[in-house]
Image (tube, helix red, strand yellow):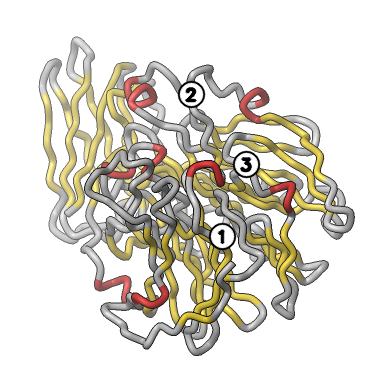
Amino acid sequence: MHTSVRRNHMLNIGGVIPGLAVKGDALPARSESGIGGLMTWADRLWFITYVSHTRTTGAGTGLYEVDEDLQIRKRPESVVGTYANRLLHTETNQVILGPHIIDVEGNVRTIEALQDHRLAATMRHLHDPANKVYFLTMEGLFLEFDLNTFNIEQLYDLTQELQIPRGAQPHFKSGHTSHGRVVVTNNTYDERDFAGTQAAGRLAEWDGERWTILERTGFNEVTGRMNFGSAIFATGWDKASAILRVFTDGSWSRYRLPKGSHTFDHFWQTEWPRIREVEHERFLMDCHGMFYELSPTTYGGKVWGVRPISTHLRVVPDFCAFRGFLVMGGNQVTPTHDSNLLAGEPQAGLWFGKTDDLWQFGKPRGWGGPWWEAPVKSDVPSDPYLMTGFEHKGLHLYHDAPQTVDITIEVDFLGTQNWQTYDTLSIPAGKYVHHEFPTAFSAHWVRFTSNTTCNATAYLMYN
């Protein structure tokens, strides 16, 4: 296997260094070469690339390291597979990246028994974190791995435990351990979910004995720090909007965010959007085509506000900080067995920049709302929906009740769930009402309450 250092000659175009791009082989099958996981470790930037579905679907991917001079080397321990898991195991001072274990000197061991699993996440163990970890596969296998003996035991098939509907493709994406629970995400979502004929996505938690389903829609990411109260953040979406779930002070809260684009509405199109720390104790959140600032801290059990940075079309399977850079992985060209006849060689690249460069991407804009033809109970407020950070805001309201319905608009401008009435709009039967908020009017969150039980829509367009 070729393992020599590849010189990149430092050609840099808008943060893209062509010499650091990676590719998959064109033969025997053209698949993907996405960058599934990035970690800084042992004085290097490490990343792992993936094919679409285990080594049977492609070739040429592997484990790479980049040194401080931005010279790239493909490691001889590389294996072909589908991997997007990464974790620092603190007790043994090792990074787990794909099926590889990397020590502080940069030595690599490969767990061959994991090679043919599509690894979505590695999580800390609930009861023996010094010696064991959990692995989650995209197919929903929940595995226990002994770091000393390399013994692997399957604990659960989550397609069964979490009641994934028959005929739906499981697509588990992330997992995180905190507060005595393991939280996992499955982002299965296609036209059947949009139409309401199935609900295959999941956000779920396990206390070591019992699994509990928290959401039945597509969820991509779940993570959190191990201090500042160790809040857990999880992102997903449904027909109406993007969703942010937060666990803090012993309970879960739900917030709603705009969708930056409908090009992320299918589960294959949401490949590993992350929440990661990119500046000291500050999170960057990638959610449904939009980057956000996110604080890891919650005061009074509340998220004060999530500030949008920019919209984007890039598929960003992972990102991290390295030598003062913000580095983003990508998944740029995917022939995927020639389903795309205008793509040839599978390729992906790294983007190098500063965190502040993200404000030069697309202006924050999007659409969504707490209700899309949703069953609404009288006098029950909707989920909070993000309002801050957008210049122009238009609201669309309608319902199916046979009489006039009053919908009250409340805003939380402090971010503490201290709601104040903005206005009450009357929507006659069979009519539609549009409202324009004043330019630059903003609050952290907005919510809606109907005085009538009905099916209603409250949808906002932000420009």
Mark 1 element type? loop
Find residue 89 and report its horizontal and vertical position in percent.
75, 64
Disc 2: which residue: 168
CA gap between label 2 and label 1 equals 39 Å
- What's the amino acid at mark 2? Ala
Residue receiving disc 1: 299
The crowding category of the residue bearing disc 2, from other C-alpha atoms within 10 Å (few below 14, some 14 to 19, many at least 20), is: some
Which residue corresponds to the image point at 18% horizontal and 40% vertical from the top-left? 395
Question: Can residue 251 be seen?
Answer: no
Query: Which numbered disc, 1 or 3, marks the residue that appears first in the sequence?
Result: 3
Residue at left 41%, top 47%? Answer: 31
The answer to whether the residues at label 1 and label 3 have Cβ atoms under 8 Å apart is no
* Looking at the image, residue 163 lies above or below residue 330: above
Q: Earlier in the sequence, mark 2 or mark 3?
A: 3
Q: Marks 2 and 3, Cα distance to the nearest angstrom? A: 16 Å
Which residue lies under the disc numbered 3?
A: 137
* Lower sequence index among marks 2 and 1: 2
Tell me if residue 108 comes above or below residue 460 in the rendering.
below
